[in-house]
Image: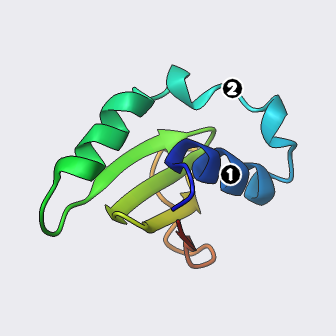
């Protein structure tokens, strides 16, 4: 399984057409260690959602991440393209 932080930053970089190394550290948005512990400790269905660099990141399983753009009002853009899904 790929590292969750690396996956998120890489995918957001791709979607934003920016070098992932130019993005702010994910740890400035969410406690990455706590995120990994939460994912590892849950036994059954779950959903974790947060915003990073203008994208809503939704984790719905140990290896299922979806990322979609956020509108200016802060809501996920329902008229935009389908969320990008990534398997870890």
Question: What element does badge 1 sit on?
Answer: helix
User: x and y percent of residue 78 in the render?
Assistant: 49, 71
- The crowding category of the residue bearing disc 1, from other C-alpha atoms within 10 Å (few below 14, some 14 to 19, many at least 20), is many
Q: CA distance from mark 2 to mark 1?
A: 11 Å
2 relative to 75 in the view: left or right: right
Q: Is residue 23 above or below residue 88?
A: above
Most extreme residue toward the bottom is: 82
Residue at (49, 52) in percent of width and height = 56
70 relative to 13 in the view: left or right: left
Residue at (79, 41) in percent of width and height = 20
Relative to the observer, which residue lies in front, 33 or 11?
33
Relative to the observer, which residue lies in front, 70 or 63?
63
Q: Are marks 2 and 1 in contact (CB under 8 Å)?
A: no
Q: Is residue 47 above or below residue 39?
A: below
* Disc 1 target residue: 12
* Disc 2 target residue: 24
Relative to the observer, which residue lies in front, 81 or 36?
36
Where residue 41 is drawn, which disc sits there? Answer: none
Most extreme residue toward the top is: 28
Question: In this figure, what is the number of numbered marks?
Answer: 2
Residue at (52, 65) in percent of width and height = 88
Residue at (56, 62) in percent of width and height = 68
């Amino acid at each position: 399984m790929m590292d969750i932080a690396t996956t998120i930053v890489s995918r957001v970089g791709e979607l934003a057409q920016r070098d992932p190394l130019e993005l702010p550290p994910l740890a400035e948005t969410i406690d990455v260690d706590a995120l990994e512990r939460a994912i590892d400790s849950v036994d059954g269905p779950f959903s974790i959602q947060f915003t990073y660099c203008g994208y809503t990141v939704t984790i719905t399983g140990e290896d299922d991440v979806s990322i979609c753009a956020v509108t200016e009002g802060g809501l996920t853009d329902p008229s935009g393209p389908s969320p990008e899904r990534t398997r870890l």
